[in-house]
Each structure stands twice: as C-alpha cells, then as structure tokens.
Image (cartoon, coloured by chain):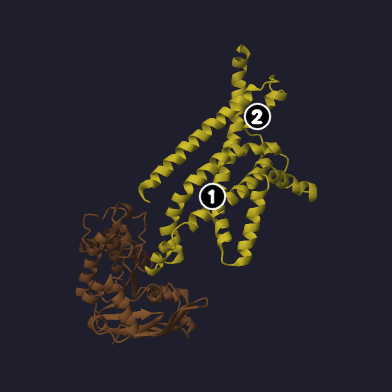
Chain colours: A brown, B yellow
Amino acid sequence: MAILEVEHVFKSFGRTAVLKDISFSMEKGQALSLIGSSGSGKTTLLRCLNFLERPDKGVIRVNGETLFDGMNGDTKRESEIRKKRLHFGLVFQSFNLFPQYTALKNVMLARELLEKEKEGYKARKKEIHQEIEGQAAELLKQMGLGEKMKRYPHELSGGQCQRVAIARALALHPDILCFDEPTSALDPELTGEVLRVMKELAERKMTMIIVTHEMDFARDVSDQVIFMDDGQIVEQGTPQQIFETPEAERTRQFLARYTEE
Amino acid sequence: MELIMEQLPIVLHALNIGFLQTLKLFFVTLIGAAPLGLVIAFGSMSRFKPLSWLTKIIIWIIRGTPLMIQLLIVYYFPGLVFKNNIWGSGEAGRFLAASISFIINYACYFSEIYRGGIQNIPVGQEEAGLVLGMTKRQIFFKVKLLQMIKRVVPPMSNEIITLVKDTSLARIIALQEIIWAGQAFMKGSQGISGAIWPLFCAAFYYLIWSGLVTVLLGKLEKKLNYFR
C-alpha cells in the first residue's frame, strides 16, 4: 500500500493558481525528488503536506488515513491538524533552528513538549528526559555532530546547522521526511556534508520527499523523480526515465538548461 | 556654606522620604506596565479587526497626549464631573491615581516595543515550531518569548530610564515625590526657605538611580548575548 497518496490538490494565492490538480503517490522507504524551476509549485506542495498551507481542494492520505479532504471541514480543524502534522517532518531551506537553544536542546524540545502532555509524565519525568536526551544525542552523532551538541546555532556552520535541523525533524519519527531545498542556502563547499547525510537516510530506507535543484543528487539518490512546471506534474518516473529518456518537451528543456551549466 | 551643612540633614531626610515615593511609583509602574503592555501588544496584533483598531486608537490617544494631562484627568475627572472624588484626599489616593495613569501610559509605549520585537522574529521560527507539533502557545513561550526579550531590551532600557525621570510629573497632582520634597524648601519648610540647592540634591538622586538602572539593563543585555 502506498504510504502517501495525494489526489487532485489545488491551491491558489489570491488569483494566482500555484497548484493545479496535483496527484501522485509514493511507497514506503522511497526517496522522491521534486524538481522544476522556481515558481513551479514544488515548495507550496511540500508546505501543503506539512499543513503550513491549506489546499483549496483535494485529498491527502497517509497509510490510508485521510489527513486532509477539501470536502470535509473536520479535517481542517487546527487541533486535528496538529496531530496530523506529525506524520511529516520538514527540513527548511533556512534551517530555522531555535537560536536560544543548543544543538542538543533543539533536537529535544518538541519531543519533551509532546511527552509532557501525556499521562503519567510527572511520575517518570527524569526517566523520560534521559531517554529523550539519549536519543537526541544518538541522532546528532549519526549526523556527525557528536562534538557539537552543546553549541548554539550561531556557533555552527550552515552545513552543521542543517544537519542539526535534520536530526530535529527525525527526533519525532515522522513517517515521511520532507526537505525544502535543503542545500540552497549553503556555500557550495558545505552542500556535500548535508547531501551525504541525506544519502545515508535514503540508504536506511527513510521515506523522503526532496525539493531540490541538485540534479546529480536527484539522479543518484532518489527512487522516483517528479518534474513540476507551472503548478502541474509534467512527468513522474524513475531517475533513469526522467533524466535519460524524458517524454515531455518541457522536461527536456528544463534538463537541458541544467546540463548546460 | 556652614548653613547648608547645618540644613543638609533636614533636607536629605525630606528628600529620602520623597525619593521613596518616587521609587514606589517607578516599580509599581514597571511591574504593572510590563505585562499589560504585552496584552495590549496582542490586542493591536489581533486578527479580529475591531479589537486591533480599538487598541490602536487607545495607543494613539495615550501616546499622542502628554502624560501630565492624563494625570490631571485621571485624578480630577471623577471629582469634578461626577462630584465623586474616588481617590479620597490623602497621599494614598494620589499615589493610586498616579500609578494607574503611569501604568496605562507606559503599557502603551511598551506594547509598541513588544509588537516590534515579536514581528521582527522570522516567520520561520513559528513554522519550525508548527511542523514539530507545537501549539501556538508553546511556540510563544518556548521559542519566541526569549528572542523577543532579547530584541526589546535595548529600546526598553530607553523607556525605563525615561520613566525614572517621568515619575516627577506626578508632582502635578501633588504626589509627595522627591521634587515635591525639594521644592518645599523654596517656599519654606522646617525653617528653611528660598533654598534652591535641595533641588540640585534631588537631581543627584535621579542621576544615581538612572545610572544604576543603565548598568543593570546593560548587564541583562550582555547576558542575552549568548545567542544571536
């Protein structure tokens, strides 16, 4: 069964239609790359999945559960949405780490707040805290940041910040981890360390949706590639299909511009 | 000179009593206006338009008129218009009227500083909190509040130092603060009259106090420098 099904999603900002009838699905453990030029709607699609934007129409299902249905008002309620968001994680282009907390605390904060709401938290407070801290430290080590746990974001490089942000998203065990141009704000020499971490996640079969301009990465790491243009999905397929034998003229034009560079 | 040395203890004693009242007004205003300012800030940022307009009009009126007029109106209005002097005739009533005027006035100034502080926080902070499953409340208290405090400390320092000196306006409703105490020796009090030097002493009290406040707020600013 598909882990994610998106059906006929529409989204406009004022009169500008940004997403026009988007439908796709993906399997658990896949890495899906969303490519396309700026303004094609990739980021908006990602933000709709994370409920930072509400689609005007359409259905979003995870593991068969309907998270959003434009026809059903109940699925739009804020209290409902909060829980549903947790199916997804999101890594932002600009990291958006919390500057007043150390790397470790950035990773721990959301988990701690969620645990606090559960019953029996007070009795096991210390135990839970240690468990969360242990897991957060483990995640940071996986990101190669074992030495930087006590550092504040402004003491870290962009690449290190982004890896903290990835750990922070992973700490909540999302079903699907989304990346919104995770390396676009980084100096070229720092993109490698972030892409490496993402590649490792793909190898460990983390389900991922990646909005990216890194074509080599999309080709080498993802299982599926979607090319978007003007708010529509033009073409979807394996990296081989999209990069070697693209069917649509628009895909060919887009890729030509990239290979020229 | 000898005379001044003789009169000094009398004057200082009077000034001390006055300064105590000044300090009381200072702290009451600060403790009242700091949280009220936050409430007003949220009011002016509310998405419920009538509330945000109403709040903005109130802020406009309070910031657009002299605090001295506000003091006079708050203190005399009930007595003159409704023939009911709710403040009574004693110092306690004057202090209460002054406190209320100062708290409302300063809360409006603070609210604009807070609003700037909150709106300057990048929207990405809220979005990061949301996708991590935090409630708006948790995002405010755990993510935004400290960043806001860091941003508002420098402009707040200015306001607070102004407040040190503004307390003297309460003199207009005869609150017995330090200027009132110093001025008494011009007119004549406890055998001293026509003396201007007690007011110089009073100025010195303000200098020391505003210096102390500056140093303390500077320390706070430095303390919050651990993040950016």
Residue A147 lies in what quarter of the image?
A: bottom left
Q: Is residue A252 left or right of residue A203?
A: right
| Residue A63 is at least partly visible in this image | no
Q: Residue furthest front?
A: A260
Please rate how many residues cluster around mark 2, counting C-alpha atoms within 10 Å: few if below 14, some from 14 to 19, many from 20.
many
Going from N to C along the chain, the mark reached first, 2 or 1, is 1
User: CA–CA distance between discs 2 and 1?
Assistant: 28 Å
Q: In percent of the image, x 40 and y 47: which residue is there?
A: B224
Q: Is residue A233 above or below residue A131?
A: below
In the image shown, does A231 or B137 lie closer to the viewer?
A231
Q: Disc 1 residue type?
A: Ala
Query: Secondary structure under badge 2?
Result: helix
Q: Choose mark 2 or mark 1, whichever is in front.
A: 1
In the image, which disc is placed on residue A139? none
Along the horizontal axis of the image, is B188 left or right of A46?
right
| Chain letter of the residue beneath label 1 in the structure image | B
> Which chain hosts label 2?
B
**Quarter of image, res A55:** bottom left
Label 1: which secondary element: helix
**Label drawn at residue B181:** 2
Q: Amino acid at mark 2?
A: Ala
Rate crowding at label 1 as few (under 14), some (14 to 19) or many (20 or more) other CA atoms within 10 Å.
Answer: some
Q: Residue at x 79, y 47 (%)?
A: B80
Q: Position of residue B197 (x, y in %)?
A: 63, 22
Q: Would you say B189 lies left or right of A244 here?
A: right
What residue is disc 1 on?
B34
Question: Quadrant location of the N terminus of chain B?
Answer: top right
